[in-house]
């Protein structure tokens, strides 16, 4: 009997897919994405990471899968989309790999350095803040975007307007992230709760298990755009989060090639077109990309 019920539910769900009258998913939908001209990449020599990718036949790129407009995995098709994914594809094209030669792998905030150190991914594009601590462990190309820490609360909450209102309140963030570290150090009276992902935090916010979610404004704006009746982003930005492409620390050839690729796509308009078709839809104002830091 149980089996019949499950099957019946499945049939109903499948029947609903794509049928007229099915409500569209909430939030703005993606517009046309740019396509990127694939270069030969042959002139880039001396990168152990690229050599391994060439003999493997594809790149493996670390990303997020639950951050709307930035890095999101479609559970039905397995496809990834968002601004970070476009960045990964545009620079991949300059390394000699077409988008269909990129395998994306979801890596949580806390596991990025280990994934790069172990060679689990060739590079990482997923709201990854460049800072000196992380530079001891990995390399960074970029920055390709500048975000800042902010707060997400329930739409009907009128008590939290900035980080100083978090005293004694439960605030959720991702383990191993710079926003979680900042709350611990600078706002010790807040009750910090960490999960692997921000989407777990958002679920807990909607069900009132926590009072706020904190991370980069880009990420929070995406969740708010998907659930505008339940959520809102509040307060000023209280940090600078320059996003970089994470690389294995000692592969300076790869880091240099990624910086060249970012500069190339910022100049030819791909960066801006990709932005407009992804993150721009969540309402984050269109910025000028920050200057690339070739340290
Ligand atoms: N940009 C911040 C960080 O790298 C927060 C976002 C994230 O966890 O990916 O820690």
Image: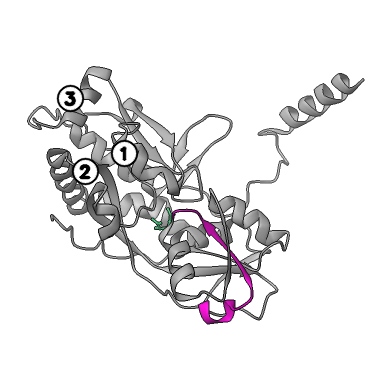
- The one nearer the camera, 193 or 265, is 193
The magenta stretch is 163-176
Percent position of residue 64, x then y: 45, 44
Quadrant assignment for ligand 1: bottom left
Percent position of residue 166, x then y: 58, 76
Q: Are marks 2 and 1 in contact (CB under 8 Å)?
A: yes
Relative to 72, is 124 on the left or the right?
A: left
Magenta segment: does it hold 75? no
Q: CA distance from mark 3 to mark 2?
A: 16 Å
Percent position of residue 272, x then y: 30, 55
User: Which of the 4 quarters of the picture holds residue 190?
Assistant: bottom right
* Residue furthest right in the image: 1
List the residue tagged with mark 3. Answer: 51
Q: Which badge, 1 or 3, is on the more N-terminal residue?
A: 3
- Asked whether mark 3 and ligand 1 are closer than 8 Å, the reply comes as no
List the residue tagged with mark 2. Answer: 249
Q: Is residue 31 visible?
A: no
Q: Are marks 3 and 2 in contact (CB under 8 Å)?
A: no
Q: Which badge, 3 or 2, is on the more N-terminal residue?
A: 3
For the point 14% across and 46% down, the residue is: 260
Relative to 261, is 155 on the left or the right?
A: right
Element under disc 3: helix
Percent position of residue 83, x then y: 38, 49
| Labels 1, 3: front one | 1
Element under disc 2: loop
Magenta segment: does it hold 164? yes
Which colour style is shown? one colour
Q: Is residue 85 visible?
A: yes
User: Which of the 4 quarters of the picture holds residue 293?
Assistant: bottom left
């Amino acid at each position: 009997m149980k089996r019949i019920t499950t099957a019946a539910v499945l049939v109903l769900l499948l029947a609903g897919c794509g049928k007229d009258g099915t409500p569209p998913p909430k939030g703005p939908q993606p517009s046309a994405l740019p396509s990127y001209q694939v270069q030969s990449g042959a002139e880039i020599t001396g990168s152990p990471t690229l050599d391994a990718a060439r003999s493997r036949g594809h790149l493996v790129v670390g990303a997020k899968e639950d951050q709307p407009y930035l890095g999101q995995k479609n559970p039905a098709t397995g496809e990834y989309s968002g601004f970070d994914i476009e960045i990964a594809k545009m620079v991949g094209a300059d390394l000699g790999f077409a988008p269909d030669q990129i395998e994306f792998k979801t890596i949580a905030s806390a596991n990025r350095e280990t994934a790069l150190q172990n060679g689990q991914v060739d590079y990482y594009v997923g709201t990854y803040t460049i800072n000196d601590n992380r530079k001891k462990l990995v390399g960074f190309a970029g920055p390709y975007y500048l975000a800042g820490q902010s707060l997400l609360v329930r739409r009907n909450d009128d008590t939290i307007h900035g980080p100083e209102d978090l005293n004694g309140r439960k605030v959720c963030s991702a383990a191993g992230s710079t926003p979680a570290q900042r709350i611990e150090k600078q706002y010790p009276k807040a009750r910090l709760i960490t999960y692997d992902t921000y989407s777990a935090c958002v679920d807990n916010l909607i069900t009132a298990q926590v009072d706020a979610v904190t991370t980069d404004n880009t990420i929070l704006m995406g969740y708010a755009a998907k659930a505008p009746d339940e959520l809102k982003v509040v307060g000023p930005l209280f940090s600078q989060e320059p996003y970089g492409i994470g690389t294995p620390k000692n592969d300076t050839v790869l880091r240099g090639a990624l910086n060249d690729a970012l500069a190339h796509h910022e100049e030819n308009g791909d960066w801006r077109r990709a932005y407009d078709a992804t993150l721009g839809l969540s309402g984050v104002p269109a910025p000028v990309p920050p200057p690339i830091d070739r340290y």
